[in-house]
């Protein structure tokens, strides 16, 4: 784990749903436009795509007085400290962690197994027409050059604040915000200051590595090594203890020697 | 009377070796997917994507051959009689040096259990394999469970195969001939499978 993790603080109380972050991300990362249709909501597109690394989720709720209340939340890869995608990826380097704690990806090394899609607690990785993984990489190229990620640069309300993770946490605490993701999954790289419960924002209340993935990687794998070598040892011990069951030639037996 | 009696016909032997060859291909191409520990095995297939392609093709061969082999033998291994229960009670006599053989039919109780396991494991590995192949078609929870079951049954399978390979070679000399030439010595049949030996015309 990195000594100095960087990340985002997403302060949902500041978000005005302008989607500058979506546009800036597409421009900087040169991502194709997704064709969408009007579906009776301002939310657009309705989900992350291989060409949409972050988007604003619009949570519309009737207020009971004939009106509607809106909440906005930026949805993207959360750069988990203990990342399910990295845990299952069988191709070293296809998903990797930078020294400042960001989970990047390398399409050249992706072998298209799609395990990361199943292992992500937040349903983030997407596969496009090239059959390779894609997701938010926090504009690693910009960060490397000392700039802030494109989305944060474009955000006009400072909803997206990029910086050292500890400083962001201290800042949010100082202003009395309730933080989401501070300790989950060894700490999320993208922290949320929410104005309601995580569920109201479509986030799992207590995110964790999916149980089946944990059982595969942390239980079955060690047991498997024990099981395989155990069965090899068992037959070897059996052989030297009891030996093979030789059947002696019966001298009374008559007939040709040839098989068949 | 010849010295040998036929145990497996040509079709059965060919199916068996198709199952074995595709299984080891699946093992080598799948190890790297099972865990990063075995990443080096990808090199045998020119990388991870090559290994995945081979794994899918070998999986189809294995599924077809194993199901056919199972269908071929299912009649001889789906019922357990009193002699089979006696076999289980004495663990096939494998934990003693007592040369007494048990009164088994074409397949003894252990072989029957092995055959049924292979059939069941083939179905589970086949279904979960298809789900893992096209995960976007299924809900995430199903795919996760499928990944876990594919790993679990692979593990059980390889452990059972280790025992199978032992018992059919050095564990019981004279057995392997049945899967190579198709026939076994009469004395082997009389000692290991007396009930079956009588059925096929022994004394």
Image (cartoon, coloured by chain):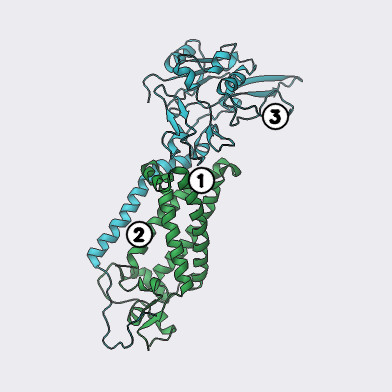
Chain colours: A cyan, B green
Q: Secondary structure at mark 3?
A: loop
Q: Is residue A86 in view from this perspective?
A: yes
Q: Is residue A207 above or below residue A244?
A: above
Outermost residue, left side? A240
**Residue B115 % position (x, y):** 45, 66
User: In front here: A183 or A246?
Assistant: A246
N-terminal of the pair, mark 2 or mark 1, is: 1
How far separated are the C-alphas under marks 3 and 1? 33 Å
Q: Chain of mark 2?
A: B
Q: Chain of mark 3?
A: A
How far separated are the C-alphas under marks 2 and 1? 26 Å
Tell me the tag on residue B162: 2
Q: Is residue B195 in view from this perspective?
A: no
**Residue B100 % position (x, y):** 29, 77
**Residue A4 % position (x, y):** 39, 18
Residue at image mark 3 = A36
């Amino acid at each position: 784990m990195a000594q100095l993790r960087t990340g985002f603080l997403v302060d949902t109380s500041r978000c005005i749903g302008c989607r500058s972050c979506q546009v800036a991300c597409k421009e900087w990362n040169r991502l194709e436009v997704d064709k969408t249709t009007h579906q009776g909501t301002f939310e657009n597109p309705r989900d992350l795509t291989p060409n949409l690394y972050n988007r604003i989720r619009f949570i519309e709720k009737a207020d009971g007085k004939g009106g509607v209340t809106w909440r906005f939340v930026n949805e993207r890869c959360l750069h988990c400290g203990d990342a399910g995608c990295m845990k299952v990826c069988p191709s070293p380097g296809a998903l990797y962690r930078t020294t400042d704690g960001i989970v990047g990806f390398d399409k050249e090394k992706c072998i298209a197994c799609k395990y990361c899609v199943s292992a992500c607690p937040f349903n983030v990785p997407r596969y496009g027409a090239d059959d390779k993984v894609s997701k938010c990489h926090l504009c690693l190229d910009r960060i490397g050059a000392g700039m802030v990620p494109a989305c944060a640069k474009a955000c006009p309300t400072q909803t997206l604040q990029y910086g050292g993770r500890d400083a962001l946490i201290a800042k949010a605490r100082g202003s009395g915000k309730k933080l989401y993701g501070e300790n989950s999954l060894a700490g999320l790289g993208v922290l949320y200051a929410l104005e309601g419960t995580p569920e109201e924002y479509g986030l799992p209340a207590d995110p964790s590595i999916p149980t089946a993935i944990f059982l595969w990687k942390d239980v079955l794998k060690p047991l498997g090594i024990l099981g395989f070598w155990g069965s090899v040892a068992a037959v070897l011990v059996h052989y030297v203890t009891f030996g093979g069951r030789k059947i002696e030639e019966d001298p009374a037996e008559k007939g040709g020697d040839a098989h068949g | 009377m010849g010295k040998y009696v036929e145990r497996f016909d040509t079709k059965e032997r060919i199916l068996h070796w198709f199952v074995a060859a595709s299984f080891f291909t699946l093992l080598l191409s799948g190890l790297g997917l099972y865990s990063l520990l075995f990443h080096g095995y990808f090199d045998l297939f020119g990388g991870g994507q090559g290994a995945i392609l081979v794994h899918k093709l070998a999986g189809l061969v294995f599924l077809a051959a194993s199901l056919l082999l199972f269908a071929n033998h299912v009649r001889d291994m789906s019922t357990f009689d009193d002699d089979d229960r006696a076999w289980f009670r004495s663990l096939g006599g494998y934990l003693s040096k007592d040369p007494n053989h048990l009164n088994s039919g074409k397949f003894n109780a252990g072989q029957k259990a092995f055959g049924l396991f292979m059939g069941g494991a083939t179905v589970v590995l086949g279904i979960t394999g298809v789900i893992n192949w096209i995960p976007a078609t299924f809900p995430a929870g199903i795919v996760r469970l499928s990944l876990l079951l594919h790993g679990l049954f692979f593990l059980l399978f390889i452990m059972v195969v280790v025992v199978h390979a032992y018992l059919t070679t050095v564990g019981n000399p004279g057995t392997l001939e049945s899967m190579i030439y198709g026939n076994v010595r009469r004395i082997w049949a009389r000692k290991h499978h007396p009930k079956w030996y009588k059925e096929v015309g022994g004394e």
